[in-house]
Amino acid sequence: MTDSTLIAAAKTSKAWPFEEARKLAKRFPQGKPGGEPVLFETGYGPSGLPHIGTFQEVLRTTLVRRAYEVLTDGAPTRLVAFSDDMDGLRKVPDNVPNGELLAANLGKPLSRIPDPFGKYESFAHHNNAMLCEFLDRFGFDYEFVSASDRYNSGAFDDALRNVLRNYGAIMDVMLPTLRAERQATYSPVLPVSPSSGVVLQVPVEVVDAEAGIIRFADEDGSTVEQSILGGQAKLQWKVDWAMRWVALGVDYEMCGKDLTDSVTQSGKIAKILGGRRPEGLIYELFLDEKGEKISKSKGNGLTIEEWLRYGTEESLGFYLFREPKSAKQLHIGIIPRAVDEYWQFRERLAEQDLDKQLGNPVWHLSRANGGVAGADAPGAGDKLAVTFGLLLNLVGVLGPRATHDQVWSYLGNYVHDANPADHPELNNLVDPALAYNRDFVLPTLHHRAPAANEAAALKALDGELAELPEDTAAEDIQTKVYEIGKDEAFGFESLRDWFKALYETLLGSSQGPRMGSFIALYGIANTRKLIEEALSR
Protein backbone atom coordinates (compact mmCIF):
# COMPACT_ATOMS: atom_id res chain seq x y z
CA MET A 1 0.00 0.00 0.00
CA THR A 2 1.49 3.39 -1.00
CA ASP A 3 1.01 6.64 0.90
CA SER A 4 -0.82 8.09 -2.09
CA THR A 5 -3.35 5.26 -1.89
CA LEU A 6 -3.94 5.95 1.79
CA ILE A 7 -4.25 9.71 1.22
CA ALA A 8 -6.74 9.16 -1.60
CA ALA A 9 -8.85 6.91 0.64
CA ALA A 10 -8.67 9.45 3.49
CA LYS A 11 -10.04 12.18 1.22
CA THR A 12 -13.33 10.31 0.80
CA SER A 13 -13.56 8.38 4.09
CA LYS A 14 -16.79 8.92 6.00
CA ALA A 15 -15.07 8.21 9.35
CA TRP A 16 -15.66 11.29 11.52
CA PRO A 17 -11.95 12.00 12.27
CA PHE A 18 -11.33 12.32 8.52
CA GLU A 19 -14.41 14.49 8.08
CA GLU A 20 -13.02 16.78 10.78
CA ALA A 21 -9.52 16.67 9.29
CA ARG A 22 -10.89 17.77 5.91
CA LYS A 23 -12.18 20.98 7.57
CA LEU A 24 -8.59 21.81 8.48
CA ALA A 25 -7.30 20.86 5.04
CA LYS A 26 -9.84 23.27 3.58
CA ARG A 27 -8.80 25.97 6.07
CA PHE A 28 -5.16 25.62 5.00
CA PRO A 29 -5.18 24.32 1.40
CA GLN A 30 -1.45 25.11 1.06
CA GLY A 31 -0.60 24.22 4.63
CA LYS A 32 -0.42 26.66 7.54
CA PRO A 33 1.44 29.85 6.51
CA GLY A 34 5.17 29.81 7.19
CA GLY A 35 5.16 26.05 7.63
CA GLU A 36 3.84 26.47 11.17
CA PRO A 37 2.32 23.40 12.82
CA VAL A 38 -1.47 23.22 12.89
CA LEU A 39 -2.39 23.71 16.56
CA PHE A 40 -4.95 21.46 18.25
CA GLU A 41 -6.13 22.42 21.74
CA THR A 42 -8.05 20.78 24.58
CA GLY A 43 -9.20 22.66 27.67
CA TYR A 44 -9.23 21.48 31.28
CA GLY A 45 -10.77 23.11 34.35
CA PRO A 46 -8.56 22.07 37.30
CA SER A 47 -11.18 22.70 39.99
CA GLY A 48 -11.46 18.89 40.18
CA LEU A 49 -9.50 15.81 39.27
CA PRO A 50 -9.24 14.60 35.64
CA HIS A 51 -12.21 12.44 34.62
CA ILE A 52 -13.58 10.47 31.70
CA GLY A 53 -14.65 13.68 29.93
CA THR A 54 -11.05 14.91 30.02
CA PHE A 55 -9.88 11.63 28.52
CA GLN A 56 -12.48 11.58 25.74
CA GLU A 57 -11.68 15.14 24.63
CA VAL A 58 -7.93 14.52 24.43
CA LEU A 59 -8.46 11.16 22.71
CA ARG A 60 -10.94 12.45 20.15
CA THR A 61 -8.80 15.51 19.39
CA THR A 62 -5.78 13.24 18.96
CA LEU A 63 -7.72 11.08 16.50
CA VAL A 64 -8.50 14.16 14.38
CA ARG A 65 -4.86 15.23 14.62
CA ARG A 66 -3.65 11.86 13.33
CA ALA A 67 -6.26 11.86 10.56
CA TYR A 68 -5.09 15.32 9.47
CA GLU A 69 -1.48 14.09 9.36
CA VAL A 70 -2.55 11.23 7.08
CA LEU A 71 -4.61 13.53 4.87
CA THR A 72 -1.73 16.00 4.44
CA ASP A 73 1.05 13.42 4.14
CA GLY A 74 2.63 14.37 7.45
CA ALA A 75 2.02 18.11 7.83
CA PRO A 76 3.37 19.31 11.21
CA THR A 77 0.94 19.47 14.15
CA ARG A 78 0.92 20.25 17.87
CA LEU A 79 -1.52 19.43 20.64
CA VAL A 80 -1.82 21.77 23.62
CA ALA A 81 -3.59 20.67 26.81
CA PHE A 82 -4.59 24.01 28.35
CA SER A 83 -5.42 24.34 32.06
CA ASP A 84 -7.77 27.18 33.05
CA ASP A 85 -6.09 27.52 36.44
CA MET A 86 -6.57 31.28 36.78
CA ASP A 87 -10.28 30.66 37.33
CA GLY A 88 -11.62 31.54 40.76
CA LEU A 89 -12.73 28.56 42.86
CA ARG A 90 -16.55 28.72 42.95
CA LYS A 91 -17.36 25.84 45.30
CA VAL A 92 -15.58 23.20 47.34
CA PRO A 93 -15.39 19.84 45.49
CA ASP A 94 -16.84 16.83 47.33
CA ASN A 95 -13.93 14.48 46.56
CA VAL A 96 -10.95 16.30 48.10
CA PRO A 97 -9.65 16.50 51.71
CA ASN A 98 -9.39 19.65 53.87
CA GLY A 99 -12.56 21.25 52.56
CA GLU A 100 -12.27 23.98 55.21
CA LEU A 101 -8.97 25.12 53.65
CA LEU A 102 -10.62 25.47 50.24
CA ALA A 103 -13.72 27.13 51.70
CA ALA A 104 -11.49 29.80 53.27
CA ASN A 105 -10.07 30.58 49.82
CA LEU A 106 -13.22 30.59 47.68
CA GLY A 107 -13.08 33.05 44.81
CA LYS A 108 -9.29 33.10 44.54
CA PRO A 109 -7.48 31.81 41.43
CA LEU A 110 -6.99 28.06 41.65
CA SER A 111 -3.24 28.53 41.33
CA ARG A 112 -3.19 30.79 44.41
CA ILE A 113 -5.06 28.45 46.77
CA PRO A 114 -3.08 26.07 49.03
CA ASP A 115 -3.08 22.42 47.99
CA PRO A 116 -5.53 20.54 50.27
CA PHE A 117 -3.51 17.38 49.60
CA GLY A 118 -0.39 19.08 51.00
CA LYS A 119 1.85 17.98 48.13
CA TYR A 120 2.14 20.92 45.72
CA GLU A 121 2.49 24.67 45.59
CA SER A 122 -1.27 25.13 45.04
CA PHE A 123 -4.54 23.31 44.43
CA ALA A 124 -4.15 23.96 40.69
CA HIS A 125 -0.57 22.68 40.68
CA HIS A 126 -1.79 19.46 42.28
CA ASN A 127 -4.60 18.96 39.77
CA ASN A 128 -2.38 19.96 36.85
CA ALA A 129 0.14 17.33 37.95
CA MET A 130 -2.68 14.78 38.07
CA LEU A 131 -3.73 15.82 34.55
CA CYS A 132 -0.22 15.34 33.15
CA GLU A 133 0.17 12.02 34.96
CA PHE A 134 -3.23 10.99 33.60
CA LEU A 135 -2.40 11.92 30.00
CA ASP A 136 1.08 10.39 30.22
CA ARG A 137 -0.44 7.15 31.48
CA PHE A 138 -2.26 6.77 28.17
CA GLY A 139 0.71 7.84 26.07
CA PHE A 140 -0.76 11.05 24.63
CA ASP A 141 1.59 13.38 22.74
CA TYR A 142 0.82 16.88 24.07
CA GLU A 143 2.25 20.10 25.45
CA PHE A 144 0.91 21.32 28.79
CA VAL A 145 0.09 25.04 29.01
CA SER A 146 -1.13 26.76 32.18
CA ALA A 147 -3.31 29.89 32.11
CA SER A 148 -1.64 31.11 35.32
CA ASP A 149 1.81 30.80 33.80
CA ARG A 150 0.70 32.78 30.73
CA TYR A 151 -1.07 35.49 32.71
CA ASN A 152 1.58 35.81 35.45
CA SER A 153 4.57 35.82 33.09
CA GLY A 154 3.13 38.54 30.88
CA ALA A 155 2.84 36.21 27.88
CA PHE A 156 -0.83 37.27 27.52
CA ASP A 157 -0.18 40.98 28.14
CA ASP A 158 -0.39 42.04 24.47
CA ALA A 159 -3.58 40.03 24.06
CA LEU A 160 -5.03 41.66 27.19
CA ARG A 161 -4.25 45.14 25.85
CA ASN A 162 -6.02 44.10 22.66
CA VAL A 163 -9.11 43.22 24.72
CA LEU A 164 -9.08 46.68 26.34
CA ARG A 165 -8.71 48.38 22.94
CA ASN A 166 -11.80 46.51 21.74
CA TYR A 167 -13.70 46.68 25.04
CA GLY A 168 -16.78 48.37 23.61
CA ALA A 169 -17.13 45.99 20.66
CA ILE A 170 -16.80 42.97 22.97
CA MET A 171 -19.49 44.40 25.28
CA ASP A 172 -21.74 44.83 22.22
CA VAL A 173 -21.39 41.09 21.54
CA MET A 174 -21.91 39.93 25.12
CA LEU A 175 -24.55 42.23 26.66
CA PRO A 176 -27.46 41.12 24.41
CA THR A 177 -26.86 37.52 25.53
CA LEU A 178 -27.24 38.33 29.26
CA ARG A 179 -30.17 38.86 31.61
CA ALA A 180 -30.74 42.45 32.79
CA GLU A 181 -29.30 41.87 36.29
CA ARG A 182 -26.18 40.24 34.82
CA GLN A 183 -25.73 43.08 32.33
CA ALA A 184 -25.45 45.50 35.25
CA THR A 185 -22.33 43.81 36.64
CA TYR A 186 -20.81 42.22 33.53
CA SER A 187 -17.27 42.96 32.45
CA PRO A 188 -15.03 41.10 29.98
CA VAL A 189 -12.19 41.68 32.47
CA LEU A 190 -12.17 40.19 35.98
CA PRO A 191 -9.69 42.06 38.19
CA VAL A 192 -7.99 40.32 41.10
CA SER A 193 -8.75 42.24 44.30
CA PRO A 194 -5.58 43.84 45.68
CA SER A 195 -6.95 43.42 49.22
CA SER A 196 -8.38 39.86 49.24
CA GLY A 197 -6.89 38.18 46.17
CA VAL A 198 -10.36 37.16 45.00
CA VAL A 199 -11.29 37.24 41.29
CA LEU A 200 -13.95 39.98 41.20
CA GLN A 201 -17.13 40.00 39.12
CA VAL A 202 -17.53 43.80 38.99
CA PRO A 203 -18.02 46.45 36.27
CA VAL A 204 -14.75 48.05 35.15
CA GLU A 205 -13.80 51.23 33.36
CA VAL A 206 -10.93 51.29 30.89
CA VAL A 207 -8.53 54.04 31.94
CA ASP A 208 -5.60 53.40 29.56
CA ALA A 209 -5.80 50.47 27.15
CA GLU A 210 -2.14 50.65 26.10
CA ALA A 211 -0.94 50.68 29.69
CA GLY A 212 -3.51 48.03 30.64
CA ILE A 213 -5.05 50.21 33.40
CA ILE A 214 -8.66 49.81 34.55
CA ARG A 215 -10.76 51.34 37.37
CA PHE A 216 -13.19 49.38 39.55
CA ALA A 217 -14.73 49.16 43.02
CA ASP A 218 -12.94 46.73 45.35
CA GLU A 219 -14.82 44.50 47.81
CA ASP A 220 -14.63 47.16 50.55
CA GLY A 221 -16.17 49.77 48.23
CA SER A 222 -12.93 51.66 47.61
CA THR A 223 -12.12 52.75 44.07
CA VAL A 224 -9.03 51.09 42.65
CA GLU A 225 -6.98 51.83 39.55
CA GLN A 226 -4.95 48.74 38.66
CA SER A 227 -3.16 47.12 35.76
CA ILE A 228 -4.67 43.95 34.31
CA LEU A 229 -1.24 42.79 33.16
CA GLY A 230 1.10 40.28 34.82
CA GLY A 231 -1.58 38.21 36.53
CA GLN A 232 -3.54 41.06 38.16
CA ALA A 233 -6.70 40.09 36.26
CA LYS A 234 -8.15 37.38 34.10
CA LEU A 235 -10.80 37.43 31.41
CA GLN A 236 -14.41 36.34 31.59
CA TRP A 237 -14.86 32.80 30.18
CA LYS A 238 -16.08 33.46 26.62
CA VAL A 239 -13.67 36.37 26.18
CA ASP A 240 -10.83 34.32 27.67
CA TRP A 241 -11.52 31.47 25.25
CA ALA A 242 -11.45 33.83 22.25
CA MET A 243 -8.31 35.59 23.49
CA ARG A 244 -6.56 32.25 23.91
CA TRP A 245 -7.51 31.11 20.39
CA VAL A 246 -5.98 34.28 18.97
CA ALA A 247 -2.92 34.51 21.26
CA LEU A 248 -1.92 30.86 20.83
CA GLY A 249 -3.03 30.51 17.21
CA VAL A 250 -5.44 27.62 17.87
CA ASP A 251 -6.73 25.95 14.70
CA TYR A 252 -8.87 23.15 16.13
CA GLU A 253 -10.77 22.65 19.38
CA MET A 254 -13.81 20.50 20.06
CA CYS A 255 -16.29 20.90 22.90
CA GLY A 256 -19.51 19.56 24.36
CA LYS A 257 -22.97 20.56 23.24
CA ASP A 258 -23.44 22.62 26.42
CA LEU A 259 -20.83 25.10 25.07
CA THR A 260 -22.57 25.68 21.71
CA ASP A 261 -23.47 29.29 22.60
CA SER A 262 -19.98 29.89 23.95
CA VAL A 263 -18.49 28.82 20.62
CA THR A 264 -20.72 31.30 18.81
CA GLN A 265 -19.96 34.26 21.07
CA SER A 266 -16.26 33.45 21.43
CA GLY A 267 -16.02 33.14 17.66
CA LYS A 268 -17.39 36.67 17.24
CA ILE A 269 -14.96 38.00 19.85
CA ALA A 270 -12.01 36.23 18.21
CA LYS A 271 -12.85 38.06 14.98
CA ILE A 272 -12.96 41.40 16.85
CA LEU A 273 -9.51 40.62 18.27
CA GLY A 274 -8.15 40.10 14.77
CA GLY A 275 -8.19 36.30 14.76
CA ARG A 276 -10.30 33.44 13.55
CA ARG A 277 -12.47 30.91 15.32
CA PRO A 278 -10.87 27.45 15.13
CA GLU A 279 -12.45 24.49 13.42
CA GLY A 280 -14.07 22.04 15.77
CA LEU A 281 -16.59 19.33 16.55
CA ILE A 282 -19.46 19.91 18.96
CA TYR A 283 -20.07 16.53 20.56
CA GLU A 284 -23.07 15.22 22.47
CA LEU A 285 -22.87 14.78 26.23
CA PHE A 286 -23.08 11.45 28.01
CA LEU A 287 -26.19 10.20 29.81
CA ASP A 288 -26.52 7.88 32.78
CA GLU A 289 -28.38 4.55 32.67
CA LYS A 290 -31.70 6.37 33.24
CA GLY A 291 -31.03 8.62 30.25
CA GLU A 292 -30.36 11.65 32.46
CA LYS A 293 -27.51 14.09 31.91
CA ILE A 294 -24.39 13.21 33.85
CA SER A 295 -23.62 15.68 36.61
CA LYS A 296 -20.57 15.89 38.90
CA SER A 297 -22.78 17.11 41.75
CA LYS A 298 -25.22 14.20 41.30
CA GLY A 299 -22.38 11.70 41.13
CA ASN A 300 -24.15 9.74 38.41
CA GLY A 301 -21.14 9.54 36.12
CA LEU A 302 -18.47 6.93 35.57
CA THR A 303 -14.79 7.39 36.37
CA ILE A 304 -11.80 6.20 34.38
CA GLU A 305 -10.80 4.06 37.37
CA GLU A 306 -14.19 2.34 37.38
CA TRP A 307 -14.02 1.58 33.68
CA LEU A 308 -10.51 0.14 33.96
CA ARG A 309 -11.53 -1.92 37.00
CA TYR A 310 -14.22 -3.70 34.97
CA GLY A 311 -12.97 -3.30 31.40
CA THR A 312 -9.89 -2.28 29.40
CA GLU A 313 -8.29 0.89 28.10
CA GLU A 314 -8.89 -0.26 24.50
CA SER A 315 -12.59 -0.84 25.12
CA LEU A 316 -12.92 2.65 26.63
CA GLY A 317 -11.21 4.19 23.59
CA PHE A 318 -13.48 2.15 21.32
CA TYR A 319 -16.63 3.33 23.10
CA LEU A 320 -15.56 6.98 23.02
CA PHE A 321 -14.62 6.78 19.33
CA ARG A 322 -18.06 5.86 18.11
CA GLU A 323 -20.75 8.40 17.13
CA PRO A 324 -19.53 11.49 18.99
CA LYS A 325 -22.52 13.52 17.75
CA SER A 326 -25.03 11.11 19.31
CA ALA A 327 -25.99 11.09 22.98
CA LYS A 328 -24.77 7.87 24.58
CA GLN A 329 -25.23 6.29 27.95
CA LEU A 330 -22.14 5.98 30.09
CA HIS A 331 -22.53 3.52 32.95
CA ILE A 332 -21.10 0.25 34.23
CA GLY A 333 -23.54 -1.92 32.29
CA ILE A 334 -22.14 -0.96 28.87
CA ILE A 335 -18.60 -2.16 29.61
CA PRO A 336 -18.87 -5.90 28.76
CA ARG A 337 -20.39 -5.21 25.36
CA ALA A 338 -17.78 -2.54 24.61
CA VAL A 339 -14.99 -5.02 25.41
CA ASP A 340 -16.37 -7.67 23.05
CA GLU A 341 -17.23 -5.20 20.27
CA TYR A 342 -13.70 -3.79 20.38
CA TRP A 343 -12.36 -7.30 19.79
CA GLN A 344 -14.81 -7.94 16.96
CA PHE A 345 -13.52 -4.84 15.14
CA ARG A 346 -9.90 -5.73 15.92
CA GLU A 347 -10.36 -9.22 14.48
CA ARG A 348 -11.85 -7.85 11.24
CA LEU A 349 -9.18 -5.20 10.66
CA ALA A 350 -6.53 -7.38 8.98
CA GLU A 351 -8.97 -8.72 6.37
CA GLN A 352 -10.71 -5.44 5.50
CA ASP A 353 -10.21 -3.39 2.35
CA LEU A 354 -8.56 -0.02 2.95
CA ASP A 355 -11.77 2.02 2.83
CA LYS A 356 -13.33 -0.25 5.47
CA GLN A 357 -10.17 -0.08 7.59
CA LEU A 358 -10.43 3.72 7.68
CA GLY A 359 -13.92 3.35 9.15
CA ASN A 360 -12.79 0.80 11.73
CA PRO A 361 -12.34 2.35 15.20
CA VAL A 362 -9.35 0.09 15.87
CA TRP A 363 -7.50 1.58 12.86
CA HIS A 364 -7.76 5.04 14.44
CA LEU A 365 -7.08 3.91 18.00
CA SER A 366 -3.92 2.07 16.98
CA ARG A 367 -2.59 5.28 15.39
CA ALA A 368 -3.60 7.57 18.27
CA ASN A 369 -0.26 7.51 20.04
CA GLY A 370 2.01 7.03 17.07
CA GLY A 371 1.34 3.36 16.42
CA VAL A 372 0.98 1.56 13.11
CA ALA A 373 -2.56 1.22 11.75
CA GLY A 374 -4.28 -1.20 9.45
CA ALA A 375 -3.43 -4.82 8.75
CA ASP A 376 0.16 -4.21 9.92
CA ALA A 377 -0.87 -2.90 13.36
CA PRO A 378 0.26 -5.07 16.27
CA GLY A 379 -2.61 -7.35 17.18
CA ALA A 380 -4.65 -6.69 14.03
CA GLY A 381 -6.60 -9.83 13.21
CA ASP A 382 -6.16 -11.22 16.72
CA LYS A 383 -9.10 -13.06 18.20
CA LEU A 384 -9.86 -13.66 21.84
CA ALA A 385 -10.07 -17.37 22.54
CA VAL A 386 -12.97 -16.64 24.91
CA THR A 387 -15.20 -13.56 24.70
CA PHE A 388 -15.57 -11.33 27.72
CA GLY A 389 -19.28 -12.19 27.84
CA LEU A 390 -18.51 -15.88 27.97
CA LEU A 391 -15.83 -15.28 30.59
CA LEU A 392 -18.42 -13.48 32.72
CA ASN A 393 -20.78 -16.46 32.43
CA LEU A 394 -18.01 -18.81 33.54
CA VAL A 395 -17.13 -16.63 36.51
CA GLY A 396 -20.82 -16.36 37.36
CA VAL A 397 -21.25 -20.11 37.80
CA LEU A 398 -17.97 -20.41 39.71
CA GLY A 399 -19.49 -18.20 42.41
CA PRO A 400 -18.28 -15.46 44.74
CA ARG A 401 -15.07 -17.23 45.76
CA ALA A 402 -13.77 -17.70 42.22
CA THR A 403 -10.07 -16.90 41.79
CA HIS A 404 -7.84 -15.95 38.88
CA ASP A 405 -6.11 -19.36 38.93
CA GLN A 406 -9.42 -21.20 39.14
CA VAL A 407 -10.70 -19.39 36.04
CA TRP A 408 -7.58 -20.45 34.15
CA SER A 409 -8.08 -24.05 35.22
CA TYR A 410 -11.46 -23.97 33.49
CA LEU A 411 -10.09 -22.12 30.46
CA GLY A 412 -7.96 -25.23 29.95
CA ASN A 413 -11.14 -27.01 28.82
CA TYR A 414 -11.45 -24.57 25.93
CA VAL A 415 -8.07 -23.02 25.16
CA HIS A 416 -5.24 -25.15 23.80
CA ASP A 417 -2.16 -24.77 25.98
CA ALA A 418 -4.05 -22.63 28.50
CA ASN A 419 -1.09 -20.65 29.81
CA PRO A 420 -1.72 -17.02 30.84
CA ALA A 421 1.71 -16.02 29.47
CA ASP A 422 0.66 -17.23 26.01
CA HIS A 423 -2.66 -15.37 26.14
CA PRO A 424 -1.86 -12.00 27.77
CA GLU A 425 -4.91 -10.22 26.33
CA LEU A 426 -7.26 -12.86 27.70
CA ASN A 427 -5.38 -12.92 31.00
CA ASN A 428 -5.87 -9.16 31.31
CA LEU A 429 -9.63 -9.72 31.20
CA VAL A 430 -9.84 -12.29 34.00
CA ASP A 431 -9.55 -9.88 36.93
CA PRO A 432 -12.01 -7.36 35.40
CA ALA A 433 -14.44 -10.26 34.86
CA LEU A 434 -14.04 -11.37 38.49
CA ALA A 435 -14.60 -7.79 39.72
CA TYR A 436 -17.60 -7.17 37.45
CA ASN A 437 -19.19 -10.46 38.44
CA ARG A 438 -18.63 -9.86 42.15
CA ASP A 439 -19.99 -6.30 42.14
CA PHE A 440 -22.78 -6.40 39.55
CA VAL A 441 -23.70 -9.91 38.41
CA LEU A 442 -23.78 -12.14 41.48
CA PRO A 443 -26.23 -9.92 43.40
CA THR A 444 -28.76 -10.25 40.54
CA LEU A 445 -28.57 -14.01 39.88
CA HIS A 446 -31.67 -16.09 40.58
CA HIS A 447 -31.82 -19.76 39.60
CA ARG A 448 -35.46 -20.73 39.12
CA ALA A 449 -36.89 -24.23 39.08
CA PRO A 450 -37.59 -25.65 35.60
CA ALA A 451 -41.15 -26.15 34.38
CA ALA A 452 -42.21 -29.72 33.61
CA ASN A 453 -41.39 -29.58 29.90
CA GLU A 454 -38.10 -27.79 30.65
CA ALA A 455 -37.15 -30.46 33.18
CA ALA A 456 -37.79 -33.15 30.57
CA ALA A 457 -35.58 -31.29 28.07
CA LEU A 458 -32.83 -30.86 30.67
CA LYS A 459 -32.91 -34.60 31.39
CA ALA A 460 -32.59 -35.25 27.66
CA LEU A 461 -29.63 -32.85 27.44
CA ASP A 462 -28.00 -34.57 30.41
CA GLY A 463 -28.37 -37.89 28.63
CA GLU A 464 -26.77 -36.52 25.46
CA LEU A 465 -23.88 -35.00 27.42
CA ALA A 466 -23.30 -38.28 29.22
CA GLU A 467 -22.46 -39.87 25.85
CA LEU A 468 -19.93 -37.18 24.86
CA PRO A 469 -16.23 -37.21 25.70
CA GLU A 470 -15.00 -34.28 27.83
CA ASP A 471 -13.04 -32.76 24.95
CA THR A 472 -16.00 -32.60 22.52
CA ALA A 473 -15.86 -29.47 20.33
CA ALA A 474 -18.19 -26.58 21.18
CA GLU A 475 -19.95 -26.79 17.77
CA ASP A 476 -20.77 -30.48 18.28
CA ILE A 477 -22.22 -29.72 21.70
CA GLN A 478 -24.21 -26.83 20.27
CA THR A 479 -25.73 -29.18 17.70
CA LYS A 480 -26.99 -31.46 20.48
CA VAL A 481 -28.47 -28.46 22.32
CA TYR A 482 -30.24 -27.32 19.14
CA GLU A 483 -31.69 -30.74 18.45
CA ILE A 484 -33.31 -30.93 21.87
CA GLY A 485 -34.78 -27.43 21.54
CA LYS A 486 -36.26 -28.30 18.15
CA ASP A 487 -37.81 -31.57 19.37
CA GLU A 488 -41.56 -30.98 19.43
CA ALA A 489 -41.88 -33.45 22.30
CA PHE A 490 -40.61 -30.78 24.70
CA GLY A 491 -43.12 -28.14 23.60
CA PHE A 492 -40.90 -25.11 23.07
CA GLU A 493 -42.53 -22.56 20.76
CA SER A 494 -39.09 -21.44 19.60
CA LEU A 495 -35.42 -22.09 20.24
CA ARG A 496 -35.38 -18.75 22.06
CA ASP A 497 -37.64 -20.25 24.77
CA TRP A 498 -35.32 -23.24 25.17
CA PHE A 499 -32.21 -21.09 25.53
CA LYS A 500 -34.00 -18.76 27.96
CA ALA A 501 -34.89 -21.81 30.07
CA LEU A 502 -31.23 -22.91 30.03
CA TYR A 503 -30.03 -19.47 31.09
CA GLU A 504 -32.58 -19.05 33.88
CA THR A 505 -32.31 -22.55 35.37
CA LEU A 506 -28.58 -23.21 34.93
CA LEU A 507 -27.02 -19.73 35.02
CA GLY A 508 -29.56 -17.71 37.00
CA SER A 509 -29.87 -15.02 34.33
CA SER A 510 -32.37 -14.18 31.58
CA GLN A 511 -29.56 -13.81 29.05
CA GLY A 512 -26.50 -15.89 28.39
CA PRO A 513 -23.85 -17.23 26.04
CA ARG A 514 -23.80 -19.66 23.16
CA MET A 515 -24.44 -22.81 25.19
CA GLY A 516 -22.12 -25.06 23.20
CA SER A 517 -19.23 -22.72 23.94
CA PHE A 518 -20.19 -22.41 27.58
CA ILE A 519 -20.47 -26.16 28.12
CA ALA A 520 -17.11 -26.74 26.42
CA LEU A 521 -15.55 -24.06 28.62
CA TYR A 522 -17.16 -25.07 31.90
CA GLY A 523 -16.74 -28.77 31.20
CA ILE A 524 -19.30 -31.44 30.35
CA ALA A 525 -19.13 -33.07 33.78
CA ASN A 526 -19.54 -29.74 35.56
CA THR A 527 -22.47 -28.82 33.33
CA ARG A 528 -24.18 -32.10 34.17
CA LYS A 529 -23.87 -31.11 37.85
CA LEU A 530 -25.59 -27.80 37.05
CA ILE A 531 -28.42 -29.74 35.40
CA GLU A 532 -28.67 -32.01 38.43
CA GLU A 533 -28.93 -28.98 40.73
CA ALA A 534 -31.60 -27.41 38.52
CA LEU A 535 -33.68 -30.61 38.46
CA SER A 536 -33.44 -30.89 42.26
CA ARG A 537 -35.27 -27.58 42.61
Image (cartoon, rainbow, N blue to C red):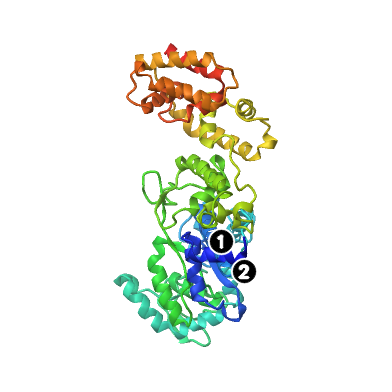
Across and down, in percent, residue 297 comes to 43, 51
Can residue 433 be spotted in the picture?
Answer: yes
Q: Is residue 189 left or right of residue 72?
A: left
Disc 2 target residue: 74
Task: Tell me if mark 2 has few (under 14), some (14-19) or many (20+) residues whose alpha carbon lies within 10 angstroms of its own.
Answer: few
Residue 270 lies in quadrant: bottom left
Give the camera-side residue of 258 and 408. 408
Q: Please tell me in which quadrant of the rendered image residue 38 appears.
A: bottom right
Nearer the observer: mark 1 or 2; the answer is 2
* SS under mark 2: loop
What amino acid does circle 2 point to? Gly
The answer to whether residue 234 is above or below residue 362 is: below
Q: Mark 1 — residue?
A: 62
Q: Which mark is residue 13?
A: none
Number of on-image labels:
2
Q: Position of residue 132 (x, y in %)?
A: 62, 58
Q: Residue at x 44, y 54 (%)?
A: 323
| Residue 201 on image: x %, y % | 42, 71
Q: Earlier in the sequence, mark 1 or mark 2?
A: 1
In x, y percent, where is residue 511?
42, 31
Q: Residue at x 59, y 49 (%)?
A: 350
